[in-house]
Image (tube, coloured by chain):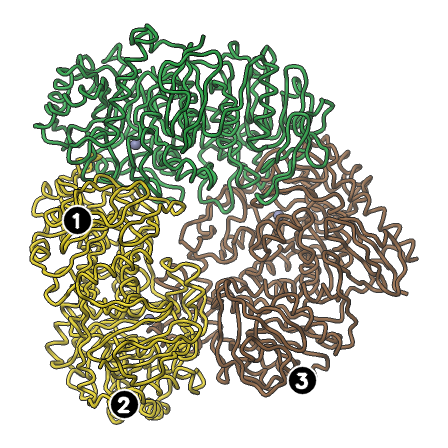
Chain colours: A yellow, B green, C brown
Amino acid sequence: MKLGVCYYPEHWPKSRWVEDAKHMQRIGIEFVRIGEFSWSKIEPTPGEFHWEWLAESLDILHAHGLKVILGTPTATPPKWLVDRHPSMLAKDEQGRVRHFGSRRHYTFASLEYREECRRIVTLMAQRYGQHPAVASWQTDNEYGCHNTILSYAEADLAAFRLWLAEKYGTVAALNKAWGNVFWSMDYRSFDEIELPNLTVTEANPSHRLDFQRCCSDQVVAFNKLQVDILREHSTGRDLVHNYMGFFTAFDHHKVGQDLDVASWDTYPLGFLDQEAIYTAEEKHQYMRVGHPDFGAFHHDLYRGCGKGRLWIMEQQPGPVNWAPHNPTPANGAVRLWTWEAFSHGAELVSYFRWRQAPFGQEQMHAGLLRPDAEEAEAAQEARQVAEEVKRLSASLGLDADELMSLPSAGKVALMFDYDACWSLDIQPQSRAYRYLFWCYRMYEALRELGLSVDIIPSNASLDTYELLVLPAQAHISPELHDRLGAYQGVLFAGPRTGSKTDSYQIPENLAPGPLASLLPLTVERVDALPEHTQPAVSGRWGAGNLKHWHEQIKTTLPCWLKDDGGNPVLMGEGRHYYLGSCIDTEVLKASLAKLAEMANLPTYYLPKGVRVRERGNVIFVFNYGVSPVFFAPENAALLMGDPMIKAAGVSIWKKN
Amino acid sequence: MKLGVCYYPEHWPKSRWVEDAKHMQRIGIEFVRIGEFSWSKIEPTPGEFHWEWLAESLDILHAHGLKVILGTPTATPPKWLVDRHPSMLAKDEQGRVRHFGSRRHYTFASLEYREECRRIVTLMAQRYGQHPAVASWQTDNEYGCHNTILSYAEADLAAFRLWLAEKYGTVAALNKAWGNVFWSMDYRSFDEIELPNLTVTEANPSHRLDFQRCCSDQVVAFNKLQVDILREHSTGRDLVHNYMGFFTAFDHHKVGQDLDVASWDTYPLGFLDQEAIYTAEEKHQYMRVGHPDFGAFHHDLYRGCGKGRLWIMEQQPGPVNWAPHNPTPANGAVRLWTWEAFSHGAELVSYFRWRQAPFGQEQMHAGLLRPDAEEAEAAQEARQVAEEVKRLSASLGLDADELMSLPSAGKVALMFDYDACWSLDIQPQSRAYRYLFWCYRMYEALRELGLSVDIIPSNASLDTYELLVLPAQAHISPELHDRLGAYQGVLFAGPRTGSKTDSYQIPENLAPGPLASLLPLTVERVDALPEHTQPAVSGRWGAGNLKHWHEQIKTTLPCWLKDDGGNPVLMGEGRHYYLGSCIDTEVLKASLAKLAEMANLPTYYLPKGVRVRERGNVIFVFNYGVSPVFFAPENAALLMGDPMIKAAGVSIWKKN
Amino acid sequence: MKLGVCYYPEHWPKSRWVEDAKHMQRIGIEFVRIGEFSWSKIEPTPGEFHWEWLAESLDILHAHGLKVILGTPTATPPKWLVDRHPSMLAKDEQGRVRHFGSRRHYTFASLEYREECRRIVTLMAQRYGQHPAVASWQTDNEYGCHNTILSYAEADLAAFRLWLAEKYGTVAALNKAWGNVFWSMDYRSFDEIELPNLTVTEANPSHRLDFQRCCSDQVVAFNKLQVDILREHSTGRDLVHNYMGFFTAFDHHKVGQDLDVASWDTYPLGFLDQEAIYTAEEKHQYMRVGHPDFGAFHHDLYRGCGKGRLWIMEQQPGPVNWAPHNPTPANGAVRLWTWEAFSHGAELVSYFRWRQAPFGQEQMHAGLLRPDAEEAEAAQEARQVAEEVKRLSASLGLDADELMSLPSAGKVALMFDYDACWSLDIQPQSRAYRYLFWCYRMYEALRELGLSVDIIPSNASLDTYELLVLPAQAHISPELHDRLGAYQGVLFAGPRTGSKTDSYQIPENLAPGPLASLLPLTVERVDALPEHTQPAVSGRWGAGNLKHWHEQIKTTLPCWLKDDGGNPVLMGEGRHYYLGSCIDTEVLKASLAKLAEMANLPTYYLPKGVRVRERGNVIFVFNYGVSPVFFAPENAALLMGDPMIKAAGVSIWKKN
Ligand SMILES: [Zn+2]
Ligand SMILES: [Zn+2]
Ligand SMILES: [Zn+2]
């Protein structure tokens, strides 16, 4: 449980650097991320290097006991480099080149650009890989930000054809897998295949899915190239990348396999304002503190991507500049977000950024310091957290390392799968259906019951979980099928599970495909509903409404929820249950409470806006509401805070 | 009154084909459409043909007594063909090439592609034109689907210049007709003229209208090319094309002139969900059965395009995949849609498709069979209709041919004109005005009065009609003017009638232009209203509101409806009446009832959701509502069903 | 106070011209604008000139005592000219060429096109510069119409690089000014700099701002080129350009410096319907007369651009064709608009257009005459105004020139700055914030208090004003700072004032930057609010709500309005006041009443829909409401009209 900050010494006169380092120390900051946008300062013109400023900056930070996360500068190649390799630029879905002038102006598939990355990362790793200040490396920055995963340039086409040839071997195999007989889309060679944009109407979904997979694999390869260099020249340092919220365009699990830690950039207010998942009421209610499950969901998701290790690389410290509207956080919100992250196992929470820049695109993005170097509100909240961590250590009788080692895993697992996300969103059937949103609402319901959840990839071990939720696992591979069959806890699968083969076809036995062995039922057809029609659902496990996606199911299983025509909605027996419709959070919560009960997991219905997270024997309680709320966990002793938790407040308890 | 199905033997193993044919027979299907997307199966590589599968398929169908509608495969040219003729690809209004990867990847104006079509259609017609199974040919598929009529490629520019030169002879004539003196748009030669896209602000409306006409004529020529080949090699077969719903981008009457039958593809739920014409209330109310006039309107429209002969080539059998939301139809809806089509004169209703494909873009589009070859709900409803047709034959004492010959024409004609549609939509003046929508609401009002309507082209004979409605006949040609003058029934013209010359200019005497000879009035100016302002209208013929379009009229004619300032809204005397505003359906219905009365046509106000259609001496009654309704036509005996018609139910009566 | 009309003799047969001139005379028209779209009639083919029609037309108008405003025809270059100089075409932000086919098909930066303009304007000025009919020249037409200021073509890039090199001297200076260290955006030479479109995410705001400034300067240079020619060959004539409503894409003050008079094109209904500033309630309420401050705001703004001289070049005379909806004006509205313009100092109100054209893009745009040459409603209202002006002259005992000379300046100044507009709109922080809209609402509040306002550029003399409002003067230059310091009236600055340096950076001392010397306060951070959250504001000066933009301010100044947390919203003492939030019109009005009181300016709360404007000793009263309203100014005698002013009515009073 340490604090960090993102720092851009190159933005400020050297005369400030020592004072900055001292000020960081005074607040209680231990980690500093630098360098990730500094290519033009390092190499202002081809082959002419200015390392001195970076060396001096590292030395100053080191001299003040600060550990550095050094960023490779590949998210912002300089203009001269782009001019040398114009083919490195991405093209958008409309076929337009995406030009220099901001950042992320490259396509992952560009082999020319990869060579430039190899060159600069090697030079940097050789030079600073063993620097005592350097504790970690961040590869690039926010892969995919500004919609940069899918690119439609020549380099992407070349990569795609190669990728397809490797995957399918023969074009006949591809034609069969994609079902190209439909609409005479058969190809005679891989060189006939084009990218799935600018087609007359939508391209074959198998074509689109494979393109998404290929683009995701380009990210994996791009990241791996840097990882290999850093491993060679900077042994012992944690390698990390900073992911983003509500972003699914590449397979984070695959990228995470090559790294040591997963981190992400947490902007609760910006995402509340901009994301379609939140209702107007939620946007208003949580305007200054963010939605209660936004941070938690991503912490649990990315901890899963980090093989158990999680950092927050960028924590919102005040108003940002990039959302449609950019309000100020509530008093205490920055502290609350920091504790929420720690409660989910974050080792580090690093604020973005140290000092607000008075220039450039993000000049209205707050930092811990204002542009005039005075402390902004968040600096005080960070200082408070640093002190509270010490008090918590003391009251638990643990040193900092022991505190960091408190186990963060839950007993409930929610399976999140990027391939499923792409598959199901390609053809939502009802416009508002989104895989990610449905997973989020599943997670929200679990969390409103006080459960601590792990969000796991489809290849994770299931052994430690009492309850396993598959929100919508589109394709059930033979390997997963075997593991699910062997699983001893309670299994709960949601609508669209098992509905596609690996090639994006409907399984021969219809959905739930291979899972029918565990869940004897057949999805006969799908009622994909407009928003204005949300039929009632009711039964022994709860009552409410369904929406978007409603399967017509034939089964002999006992039914626990039925629709307004008496048809099965939630069914199952023993350890296996299936939900055939998207249902609202209240009835979902009631049903999950039943399932948790079967799994011998205690649940409680939390007050609105209150959330709880357990880590080891510590219970963290958060109030995301705008009014004080009383909440005291059972059989626990107060360590910090008060049972009457104020708005944006936190209390910490120790289990008896 | 026969049933058919769309079938893709190339999607399935040959081992299924005999069973498929038998199963079709068992359901009562007599017609099978095949082949229209199979070019890559017929000619997988240039000049290498695989006819054998098609031959075998035809033989099997024939062996089971099934008649085939064979589709020319020109809607889906293979990739190798497109690569040989890249100039055949269309460009969208933004100037982007519309690439291979789905279907309809060609522009009608491409002479290179037309030659390829000539080649493949000739080969196919020579080979199968005399096959005993082949009863009919479908040219291409859904001309214009995915917005493919207007294309802005080089081939289109060449075609447009030629078309203009032929039409105008001299560029001076064109400059005068278009009024190019306005904004110095004069041209010195036809080669200076460009396509009307990507202009700084909107292009000259005359320019846009002529481009639309030219593109429409390209469709006519494209279709005619195939027709000529098929007539030569496959005499005696019905030639047909399958049109679409709410689609007006080419002149269907002109295309229809070259064919034997008009058919269309009927998807009541998809269109309800996606079309702007329907209110939120209608979208909710009719979610599972479609709007009560959707099928009827198009049946009557396309029967007019088919010179009296109508087929349904694709009838929705369950949820589709392409609308924003894709709900399941109500129980009975597929049967109701089928009977509605028969009641309007359809000879054939063919379901799309036989078996749901498990791959490709439409894998979520239902068929009569599910992907696992089990019957979906619609198969049972189709079987029921097949049996009911036999019972109806029997109870009427008619054989199948006599049943088919029951006259379907009405006594009311509504004139629908594609040129008027283009003209008026180019400059709507009030954003929500749409010619098609206004025609539809006119039709709805007539049909809510129980009237059976013919929708006729502007060159149709008027002799048999008692009441003639011109919803908005923008241009009144001298020839039409003469026919209207000679017309002996009641003539009712709506707003914008006679408001444009053939060159898209305002007539010298203002609207209604030449029609002022029959309707002595002058449209002095137009009040084009925002949606938030819908002034009251009232008078001896009804009361309600007007919207969108409101003409200020000077006339000495008696007025039957006036606006809230006492100005004329509906006026006329004797046999000629004029309506100067778009008015809501209730007051429109009341006024049409008055006009029908003058025309000696009995009307009755049908219960909400109920519709009636007469064919010969048979009366068909439909309930589009969600609750049972009692309705019994006067002086008629029940043949089928019940006077208390259940939701999505049908009753059939015989006139006494 | 004279009337004019826009006339297109080239659209009509010569046989009509004499009758047209006579008819104009009969109505009371004295000025006629002609020629601005006639290039293809003057020079139908390169070098072949047809001046005769123009000469004849000028002679006829002159013979009937009409004065001519002759338009240079450069807004509509002919097709042959565009074909000779394809590089003159603009490109839109998406990189697409904007083609011939309507008007304004050029980019201001094209040197090739400027040479063509020099050629045609010189020829025209030499030929007609001394013609006795020619009283004035209009340069081009509606600079920027159809979004034509920002263009992204090669000519624009060349101009931009040159402009930057001239401004910054060295690229290092540019890098520093733009803060290019952020995201490694440093350039090594001006030739590396590209246009700020099609970047991956938004370009540097300094980059965007400089591009806007450069494009604006291209307009200035383009206009100056014509001005220089006209000054040489047509001495003594007023040079004018016709600006547009709600248009800020170039610096009208700079263009205005080179001209003699400012004019603008007044379309109250079209703008009400299309502009986002107006609420749904306002759009409904003022549907047929326009928003009460639309004309006034622009009259005062453009009089400031015209160094005190104002014309209305195009006055809406009936329904137009280009808004989403195009309703008819209320009876009397054309007269009201004309008098409103005169009350703000307009010397001339010219109606667009004489006779409605039956062809081309604007065939549904009303004129004083209908297409059939009969008078439309507006002709009668224009005739009435002409007579009323004579009566007013008589009752005031002034001749026409004396009437024209009545002073139109107010005692309140509102500073409007195009550079501030671009700066603040580049980064609104809250989506709905718009500089122009905020200025308009400030103006509205002043005007609802009965105040007559001047809208002044930032370099205007402040001496004559008792109250000076800076709605949001983003950058305070040293020169302006000095003038504000010396200003002796009451100074009122709004949110975002002083928030940016000239290079688009945050000032070192934060906002209000240099103005902190007069207003000792610091804007510590900004709460940029979504529309759903409008916190309460209250205090000694009023109560209401704030929205969009809310500054957190540290100050020791007394506070007159506070937010719901007790934080400063409106503060100040003595002669200097600062408002830190956008507040609604009611509380803004109350506060402005307080400030006016301090400035010894009498105010009164006008009835809803009523507006007042003083000019010299004459008071004009307007009723924009839909019902009659009683209103009599104090200490004034009625000259025209009635204290009970009917809907769309006008009364005129003389101060005692
Ligand atoms: Zn970021
Ligand atoms: Zn279709
Ligand atoms: Zn204009």
User: For residue C573, which numbered disc appears in the image?
Assistant: 3
**At 22% across and 52% down in the image, what residue appears?**
A494
Residue under pointer 2? A390
In this view of the protein, can residue B221 be seen by the observer? Answer: yes
Q: Name the residue type under label 2.
A: Lys
- Residue B114 lies left or right of residue B47; in this view the side is right
Return the x and y of residue C222 as percentages of the image width and height: 57, 58
**Mark 1: is the Cβ under 8 angstroms from ligand 2?**
no
Same subunit, tags 1 and 3: no
Q: Pick whichever of labels 2 and 1 is earlier in the sequence.
A: 2
Element under disc 2: helix
Given this view, does label 3 or label 2 mark the residue nearer the observer?
Answer: 2
- Residue B238 lies left or right of residue A381; in this view the side is left
Pick the residue in front: C585 or C437. C585
Residue under pointer 1? A498
Q: Name the residue type under label 1.
A: Gly
Image mark 1: chain:
A
**Mark 2: is the Cβ under 8 angstroms from ligand 1?**
no
Pick the residue in front: C40 or B176. B176
Pick the residue in front: B304 or C199. B304
